[in-house]
C-alpha cells in the first residue's frame, strides 16, 4: 500500500527547514521562484538526507501530501481544488552526470528522446538553452503543447515549465542542483465524445550531483484525472502505473546517457 513518506535519514539537516521528505518537497515547491539560492541549496541538503542520498542504490516510492489552495494559486491555478489531485513521489539514482541530465531535461524534442510517450510535442522557450546550460542565467522557462493518448482516447495538454539551477556550497553533499516545476494552467482537452478528464497536473523534480558522478532524482507529481471505467488518480493501481512509468523514464534517461546524450 502506498503510504505518506517520512524522513529516511536526516543527519546534519539544516535547521528551520523541514527535515522530513514530504515537508522539504513542499518547502522547495514554495520557494522555487522567490527563495534565495542559499535557502534552496539548504532545502536540497535536507532532501538529500531524507532520501539517504549518499547510500541510495535503487528506486523507492510512495505517496506525498497534497498541495494546498495557496500553493496552487501561487502558480496560477485558482479555479480548481488541488485537494483533488493525489500526490505521489519517486526517489531514484540516474547513472549519468548532472550536466548531461540537465541537457536532456532542457532538450526541445522530448518526444524524440522518450519514444512512444507523446503523439506530438512542442516547446516555446523564454530564454536560450545554451547560455542556461553554460551557467548564466540560472533560470529557464518554456511553454509546452502536446498531444497524447490514454486508453484509446486522445487529448491535448498545455504546461508551463520553470527550471532553476542552484550551487551546493562547501558544506553541501553536492556541487549543483536543478529544480524543475511543471504546471498545467488549465485542464487537458479530450477528443469530442470522450468522458475522460485530466483536470490537474503539477510536477516537481530535483536533480543533484552525487560526488561519485551519478545524479540523484526526486520526482513529485500531483494529478487529478479520470481515465474512465473506474480508473482515477485516486486509485492505487493507477498510482502504481504512474510510479512505474516515472521509474521507467529514469531508465530511459540512463539509456540516453549511455548513447552519448541527446542528438
Image: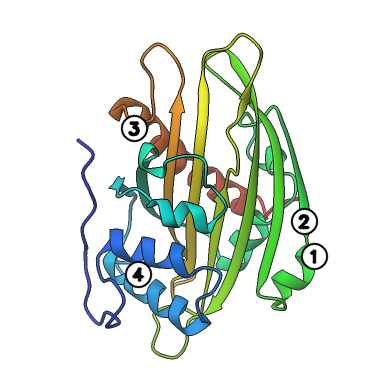
Q: Which residue is mark 4?
A: 48
Q: Which residue is mark 2?
A: 125
Residue 240 is marked as 3
Callout 1 touching callout 4 (CB < 8 Å): no
Residue 151 relative to residue 141: left or right: left
Q: Quadrant of residue 191?
A: top right
Mark toward the start of the polypeptide (1 vs 3): 1
Residue at 47% in and 70% down = 31
Q: Nearer the viewer, mark 1 or mark 4?
A: 1
> Distance from label 2 to label 3 (Cα)?
32 Å
Rendering coords of residue 90 (x, y %): 37, 49
Q: Is residue 51 visible?
A: no
> Distance from label 1 to label 3 (Cα)?
36 Å
Residue 128 is marked as 1
Image position of 149 with respect to 18: above or below: above
Q: Residues within 10 Å of mark 3 (few under 14, many from 20)?
A: some
Mark toward the start of the polypeptide (3 vs 4): 4
Residue at 35% in and 42% down = 83
Q: Quadrant of residue 117?
A: top right
Rendering coords of residue 150 (x, y %): 54, 20
> Distance from label 4 to label 2 (Cα)?
30 Å
Q: Nearer the viewer, mark 2 or mark 3?
A: 2
Callout 1 touching callout 2 (CB < 8 Å): yes
Residue 251 is marked as none
- Viewer-proximal residue, 105 or 99? 105
Q: Secondary structure at mark 1?
A: loop
Amino acid at each position: 500500500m502506498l503510504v505518506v513518506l517520512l524522513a529516511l535519514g536526516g543527519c546534519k539537516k539544516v535547521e528551520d527547514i523541514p527535515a522530513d521528505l514530504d515537508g522539504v518537497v513542499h518547502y522547495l515547491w514554495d520557494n522555487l521562484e522567490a527563495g534565495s539560492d542559499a535557502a534552496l541549496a539548504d532545502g536540497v541538503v535536507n532532501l538529500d538526507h531524507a532520501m539517504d542520498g549518499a547510500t541510495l542504490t535503487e528506486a523507492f516510492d510512495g505517496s506525498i501530501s497534497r498541495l494546498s489552495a495557496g500553493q496552487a494559486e501561487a502558480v496560477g491555478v485558482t479555479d480548481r481544488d488541488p485537494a483533488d489531485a493525489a500526490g505521489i513521489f519517486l526517489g531514484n539514482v540516474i547513472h549519468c552526470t548532472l550536466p548531461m541530465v540537465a541537457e536532456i531535461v532542457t532538450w526541445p524534442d522530448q518526444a524524440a528522446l522518450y519514444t512512444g510517450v507523446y503523439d506530438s510535442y512542442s516547446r516555446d522557450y523564454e530564454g536560450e538553452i545554451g547560455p542556461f546550460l553554460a551557467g548564466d542565467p540560472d533560470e529557464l522557462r518554456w511553454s509546452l503543447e502536446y498531444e497524447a493518448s490514454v486508453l484509446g482516447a486522445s487529448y491535448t495538454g498545455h504546461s508551463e515549465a520553470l527550471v532553476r539551477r542552484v550551487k551546493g556550497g562547501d558544506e553541501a553533499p553536492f556541487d549543483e542542483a536543478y529544480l524543475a516545476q511543471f504546471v498545467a494552467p488549465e485542464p487537458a482537452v479530450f477528443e469530442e465524445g470522450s468522458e475522460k478528464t485530466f483536470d490537474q497536473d503539477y510536477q516537481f523534480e530535483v536533480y543533484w550531483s552525487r560526488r561519485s558522478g551519478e545524479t540523484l532524482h526526486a520526482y513529485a507529481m500531483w494529478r487529478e484525472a479520470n481515465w474512465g471505467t473506474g480508473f482515477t488518480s485516486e486509485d492505487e493501481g493507477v498510482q502504481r502505473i504512474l510510479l512505474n512509468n516515472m521509474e521507467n523514464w529514469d531508465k530511459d534517461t540512463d539509456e540516453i546517457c549511455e548513447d552519448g546524450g541527446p542528438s
